[in-house]
């Protein structure tokens, strides 16, 4: 699993900060995660659920709404409607840079936001709410003591989660005029409602209202004794497991193609300029180039894989030899570094012009060996098949395209 930091632009021109959690290999689907009111993308629920979903094979983009966390803009100028616009901008970014979002996930007020944004994100086929209110105006309870001041003076400063925020009349009016139940009724996407019966922030009756208004396919799963913020890691993990299992019924999903033994296939992932997925039997590997070379550093480079092949082959060859000799070798480690050097700087090279490839090998052998045994092990390392391939004659032939 890999986390990427991304930045994209909102409809109002603000830079929005996000984190993309990606699995190892091609994801089952791309998802968006909307955080709770004033929480941010680094909240426990947003972070843990997104990472657990990535471990289950889904790529998830979590981001800060404008005016929250590391995103630009002022919170005082944001509304529920502007948050929905930010979700649509996030979907546009994900679609253009990585893959179309087919799953929308929202926690608390973020759940209300994904329900509102769903009709504007045509790619999405599934929507998940976690502890979401049925009425957007439910969020007023967070600053109930300041509502009268906001209505009469236009704004008030309130403390939410120990932090100061300015709430304006525009936000108040906006949350009171959201046709949320109509949106739920007209959703026309698969819906999963996750809610804890003992949720002390957003009562379970909200889940009942959402579930009752929605049309099939719809599902409800109780989060049992979890709190509203999914504070316990086990609760976040459970929510992610449920989402992953449920979503696979609705998102396009194909098993990796199995190629003939001995055939290695590399194909573009669409994630960045150079990202490739390597198929080797049942194994999936990601190859990429470093950021300095225009890649996203999502995986080792082709030369890194070549060096890794040499290192692994030498280590395996040494282990085989040590076992045959029944020598007391407890650990073997091989480090390989690839470089290109000017031929003129190489005293023992046949080539005199241009550059040549060099592999610098460092071998560590731990165990009860004398000097002669260690020297013999080093000699044997040069007999590894990959070493002999790289130092022998190689021909690369182009086969006709398959099919």
Image (spheres, helix red, strand yellow):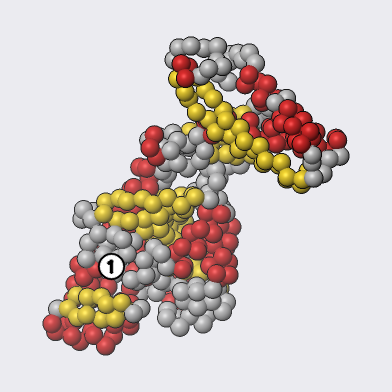
- Classify residue 389 by image quadrant: top right
Secondary element at image label 1: helix
| Residue 65, horizontal then vertical, whole percent | 31, 62
Give me the residue at 60% from left, 13% from top: 395
Report whether residue 311 is seen. yes
**Figure check: 260 above or below 30:** above
Q: Residues within 10 Å of mark 1 (few under 14, many from 20)?
A: many
Give me the residue at 19% from left, 72% from top: 170
Q: Nearer the viewer, residue 184 or 222?
A: 222
**Figure check: 37 above or below 98:** below
- Classify residue 138 by image quadrant: bottom left
Report whether 237 appears left or right of 315.
left
| Residue 102, horizontal then vertical, whole percent | 45, 51
Quadrant of the image containing the C terminus: top right
**Figure check: 127 above or below 179:** above
Give me the residue at 32% from left, 51% from top: 7
Q: Which residue is mark 1?
A: 80
| Residue 388, horizontal then vertical, whole percent | 68, 21
Q: Nearer the viewer, residue 72 or 142?
A: 72
């Amino acid at each position: 699993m890999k986390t990427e930091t991304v930045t994209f632009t909102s409809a109002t021109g603000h830079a929005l900060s996000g984190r993309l959690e990606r699995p190892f290999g091609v994801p089952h689907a791309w998802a968006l995660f909307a955080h709770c009111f004033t929480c941010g993308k680094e909240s426990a629920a947003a972070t843990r659920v997104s990472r657990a979903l990535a471990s289950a094979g889904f790529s998830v983009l979590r981001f800060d709404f404008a005016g929250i966390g590391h995103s630009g803009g002022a919170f005082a100028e944001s509304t529920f409607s502007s948050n929905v616009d930010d979700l649509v901008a996030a979907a546009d970014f994900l679609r253009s840079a990585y893959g179309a979002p087919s799953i929308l996930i929202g926690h608390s007020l973020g759940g209300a936001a994904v329900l509102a944004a769903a009709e504007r994100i045509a790619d999405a086929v599934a929507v998940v709410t976690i502890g979401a209110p049925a009425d957007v105006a439910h969020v007023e309870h967070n600053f109930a003591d300041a509502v009268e001041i906001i209505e009469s003076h236009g704004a008030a400063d309130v403390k939410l989660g120990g932090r100061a925020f300015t709430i304006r009349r525009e936000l108040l009016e906006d949350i009171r005029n959201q046709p949320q139940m109509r949106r739920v009724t007209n959703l026309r996407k698969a819906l999963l409602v996750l809610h804890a019966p003992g949720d002390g922030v957003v009562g379970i009756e909200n889940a009942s209202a959402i579930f009752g208004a929605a049309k099939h396919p719809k599902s409800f799963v109780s989060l049992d004794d979890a709190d509203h913020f999914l504070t316990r890691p086990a609760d976040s993990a459970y929510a992610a497991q449920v989402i992953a299992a449920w979503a696979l019924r609705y998102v396009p999903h194909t098993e990796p193609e199995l190629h003939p033994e001995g055939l290695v296939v590399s194909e573009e992932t669409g994630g960045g300029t150079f990202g490739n997925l390597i198929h080797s039997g049942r194994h999936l590997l990601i190859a990429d180039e470093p950021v300095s070379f225009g890649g996203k550093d999502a995986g080792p480079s082709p030369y890194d894989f070549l060096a890794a092949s040499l290192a692994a082959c030498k280590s395996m060859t040494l282990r085989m030899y040590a076992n045959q000799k029944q020598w007391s070798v407890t650990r073997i480690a091989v480090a390989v570094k690839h470089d290109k050097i000017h031929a003129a700087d190489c005293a023992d090279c046949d080539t005199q012009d241009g550059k040549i490839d060099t592999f610098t090998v460092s071998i560590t052998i731990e165990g009860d060996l004398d000097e002669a045994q260690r020297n013999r092990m080093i000699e044997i390392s040069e007999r590894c098949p990959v070493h002999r391939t790289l130092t022998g004659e190689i021909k690369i032939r182009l086969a006709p395209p398959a099919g």
